[in-house]
Amino acid sequence: MNSLFIALNLIKRTIGNRRGFLLFIVAPALIVSLIIGFSAKKDEKASVLYINSDEGAVGRHLLRELEHTGRYRLSTAPTPDAMRTAVIEHKADAAFIIPAGFSQGLKEGRAMRVELLELSMSESSFTLRMSLDQTIRQVSASLRALDASGQADDRLNLVLEQVEKHQVRAARTDYGWYASPSLGLATGILLMFLMGLVNNSVSIMVEDRKQKTMTRMFTAPVRAYEIMLGNFLGSFAVGTLQIVLVLTFTRYVMNFSYGLPFMQHLLVMECFLLAVIGIGSAVAGLIRNSENIGAVNSMVAAPTCMLGGCFWPVSIMPEFMQKLANFVPQTWAIEAIRRLGSGQGLGDVAMHLGVLGLFALVLLGIGSVVMKPGETEAG
């Protein structure tokens, strides 16, 4: 019963005022939703510039095949210098030049290539290179077949016309067996806001120590574990409300598809919440001075979020940092959600949930041991 009173008091102090409600409840829902809206990939065509210096039919065939894909918005560039300037200034995603004598070179069996210009490799420039290379290989194969029959000069235009009709097409069926591209970033931002509960828990417990509230509770018939349990239940209730509101708002108001069931998503987030509360309890038990609260975010929340992949994939980090990432709960939560989003079941993420639970158990135990309710603020 004592723990329930402490928990209710913590909830009231956290979200019982306008500032706390906006900071811990409204802000995460709005910001995560906006990030999802801006980061969701749209089917926009890539802007591509070109110069066709070829006098033959193959150059024109390349352009028609690229237009048929529907992935590019092709525009003619006046000069190579203007093309390079447009790519450097990000006015075009990529550009290419079909050299003079391109068709004749292919007819003669020479290896001909299109000059591709890109500022850095991107999805659009990579697919452009693949499309160009594939079309060139198909034309070369057709020319070899015509050359063997002695009809290369007479039949090439007819063959290219038939190819451009695309009478045989491949049908692609998208079953959606992959995680949403925006899922990792949206989850990382939500985890970052949940880490804000660490600062909140630490601030409340240090304030209680400073105001001697915790000392008065400890002199009453309230044990140390009841104080810790009360803070745990209060933080868990606030965090659960935050998670449910964000997931509900993004799913049913923003219509964002996470690709996994609501209850499975909620279960992973609740397990991560337990780990977050454990971190807050352990840190609050170690801090003895309210002036050190500001260091919590710079030394605990921000580094663990960066290391755990909240802002970028863990796979792009150096190998030693990937190993260190296994020691922060964000890594396990994001990986579990990605696996569920790609179609796996709860049995496939049982280890991830177990590790999150272990984080919570160990850190809560450390917090219960190092917290001394009878002490006042140091200094």
Image (cartoon, grey):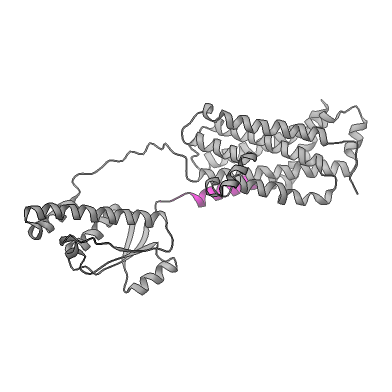
Which x, y percent locates residue 56? 17, 65
Q: Is residue 74 left or right of residue 227?
A: left
Establish if 156 lies above or below 345. below
Quadrant hosting residue 250: top right
Taking the spot 18% from the left edge, 68% from the top edge, the residue there is 55
In this orientation, does residue 364 appear?
A: yes
Is 111 left, or right, of 348 in this rendering? Answer: left
Q: Which residue is at a point 48% across and 31% down the rendered structure image?
A: 344
Q: Would residue 34 be counted in the magenta stretch?
A: yes
Q: Along the line of sight, which residue is nearer the eye, 329 or 25? A: 329
Q: Magenta region: which residues?
A: 27-42
* Residue 8 visible in the snapshot: no
x, y percentage for residue 100?
A: 22, 69
Quarter of the picture holding the N terminus: top right
Q: Quadrant of residue 15?
A: top right
Give 239 or 187, whichever is nearer the viewer.
Answer: 187
In the figure, is residue 147 to the left or right of 70?
left
Q: Position of residue 105 (x, y in %)?
A: 19, 64
Residue 170 on the magenta segment: no
Q: Quadrant of residue 225?
A: top right
Vertical side of 11 occupied by 47: above or below: below
Please give the count of numbered marks on the rendered protein: 0
Coordinates of residue 161 in the picture (x, y in percent) = 15, 55
**Is 42 or 358 nearer to us in this picture?**
358
Magenta stretch: dominant SS? Answer: helix
**Could you tell whether 325 is left or right of 37 in the image?**
right
At a point 59% along the width and 37% down the height, the residue shown is 332
